[in-house]
Amino acid sequence: MRRRNPGTRRRVALMAAADLLAFGVALCVFAYFHHVRQPQVKPTTLPTPPQAVSQQTPQPASGTEQPAAQATPAPGETPVSSEAPAVTPDPNDLLGGKYAEKFSTTGVVSDETCYRSDKVALEFRQEQRFDSLVHIIDIYIRDVHSLRTNLCQQVFGDRKSIRSLPELLPGALAISSSDQYSNRNSSEWGLLVSNSLAYSTDTNIYDFAVLFLDGTMEVYEAGQADFDALVSRGIYQAWTFGPVIVKDGAAPDNYDGAPDYIANKNPRVAIGYCEPGHYYLVMVDGTRASESGSAGATLEELSSLFLELGCTQALNLDGGSTVAMSFGGRVLNTSTRDLSSVIYLCEPDAPDAGGNGA
């Protein structure tokens, strides 16, 4: 029996190792350019149609009662009014004068659970649900420009960690991970609009949500809306991921079309809409279940939560290792991924971040 030369075996082993190394390098290069280093895209500035200005009829502040009937003064008496002067709500107020008690008229009031000014009111709370820790930000804004997005990869040239973003986003009061668009090839970004700048206009690939300049937000399944028709209404923000979890006040009958890795329990981030000026951001922990005790949430559990919060529209955003949130500069959890896109809240006159128009 002929014995193989040991030198030959070593050469074969070295060749196999070299092939594996070359394959690994090629795979890393592909992943870098496909998932990490995305092309810098020159966005298109979307027009502001005249009808995009809020057309709501101002309403009395919530909790305001009708004035009681006044007694008729006796002859010769001067009538004395006990009514406070009527306050006319700002016609540009997204909330139409409602929820006045949520805001502060005496300057900024803030702590670990709230932020209140005359334009922005944020209420933060944590709850135990679905065997998980759930972080909820209840958002009231009078100006749509208080709800902004930042495409870190486009603006700063690279993804950023949630810990670095409070310093990079001037005036950010709360920050949440978003749709992590750079996990997809640039030809598959779907509809991607940040602060009225359009980076991608395809409405046919994934489910998405659109926030319009008048403060309304609507969710759509892939292929169910025309981009030009949306532009005519005044697109301000658009997020692409999905699936839709609440539409027109109802949850989908099922999520049969969603793959198991999305439908089953997962860490979650989602955005919901109640009415113009009133929104929710929700994060469900679960990335490190063994440490935090959180298991995440199914899509059914997530949609039931948003219905309970009173939302009529809601979209599931990127979950898993992407989920991250901060409130008042305090990081609530740290994702294992750096972020290519975020949602953040600020005063409407806060400075722009890195040329990403507000």
Image (tube, rainbow, N blue to C red):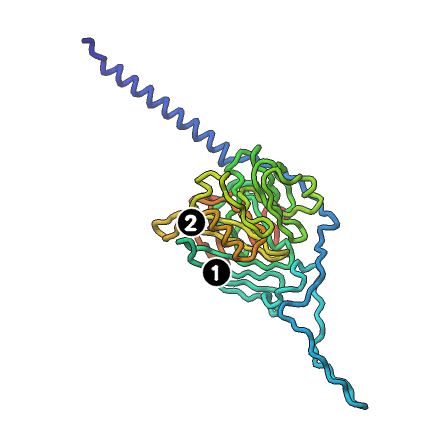
Q: Can residue 169 be seen here?
A: no
Residue at the disc numbered 1: 125
Q: Is residue 109 above or below residue 37?
A: below
> In this image, 113 relative to 219: left or right?
left
Q: Along the polypeptide, which appears first: circle 1 or circle 2?
A: 1
Relative to 94, is 295 above or below? above
Between residues 332 and 87, which one lies in front from this camera angle?
87
Secondary structure of the residue carrying tag 2 is: loop
Q: Is residue 46 above or below residue 111?
A: above
Residue 149: where, in percent of width, then height? 58, 48
For the point 51% across and 40% down, which residue is it? 158
Q: What is the x, y in percent for residue 73?
A: 77, 87
- Residue 26 on image: x %, y %: 43, 26
> Looking at the image, which residue is at 33% across and 23% down?
17
Badge 2 density bin: few <14, some 14–19, many ≥20, Cα 10 Å: many
Residue position marked by numbered label 2 in the rendering: 296
10 Å crowding of disc 1: few (<14), some (14-19), many (20+)? few
Whether residue 100 can be seen here: yes
